[in-house]
Image (cartoon, rainbow, N blue to C red):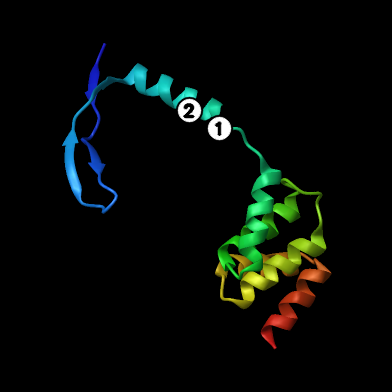
Amino acid sequence: MYRFTLPALCVAAPSLSLLGCISVPVSAEEKIEKSTESAKSVEKDHTKAVHWYRQAAEQGDAAVQSILGWMYWHGEGVEKDDTQALHWYRQAAEQGDSRAFRWLRQAAEQGHIKAQEQLDRLER
């Protein structure tokens, strides 16, 4: 069995000053096992994610508005709703989020009427 040494683990104080570092030898198998356990313990809850994304989006976070648009478009954590998706994509695009603008343009080019309307409003 091969053994690898993880990069030094550094411990930081609350003041962010470096206190010290230690090396911990770990086998590849142990690393994989720990990663798998961690992944299983994290429960995906898209409904909660939408709740928190909406709060950030309503405060004007363009990146989150774009993510929220995607979640509405695909029905992740919420009922699929093109109108809400377009609303959040437009909000993000108005703030210069290139991903949202690119998505609106692509949807419009594929014949999505509401996306074309949103894009027209942005380009005025």
Quarter of the image where one finds residue 108:
bottom right
The answer to whether 8 appears left or right of 111 in the picture is: left
The answer to whether 107 appears left or right of 7 in the picture is: right
State how many labels appear: 2
Residue that appears at 25% across and 46% down: 13
Nearer to the camera, 21 or 93: 21
- The N terminus, quarter of image: top left
Q: Which residue is mark 2?
A: 38
Amino acid of disc 2: Ser
Q: Could you tell me how far apart the alpha carbons at marks 1 and 2 are, in whole angstroms?
A: 7 Å
Q: Residue furthest front?
A: 14
- The C terminus, quarter of image: bottom right
Quarter of the image where one finds residue 34:
top left
Q: Are marks 1 and 2 in contact (CB under 8 Å)?
A: yes
Q: Which residue is mark 1?
A: 42
Residue that appears at 19% across and 47% down: 18
Q: Position of residue 70 (x, y in %)?
A: 68, 56
Q: Position of residue 109 (x, y in %)?
A: 73, 69
Q: Please tell me the numbered disc located at residue 121.
A: none
Q: Position of residue 6 (x, y in %)?
A: 25, 30
The answer to whether 79 appears left or right of 5 in the picture is: right
Residue that appears at 36% across and 23% down: 31
Q: Could you tell me which secondary element the residue under label 2 belongs to?
A: helix
* 36 w.r.t. 109: above or below: above
Q: Position of residue 3 (x, y in %)?
A: 23, 18
Q: Could you tell me which secondary element the residue under label 1 belongs to?
A: loop
Nearer to the camera, 116 or 31: 31
Label 1 neighbourhood size at 10 Å, few (<14), some (14-19), many (20+)?
few
Quarter of the image where one finds residue 113:
bottom right
Amino acid of disc 1: Val
Nearer to the camera, 13 or 37: 13
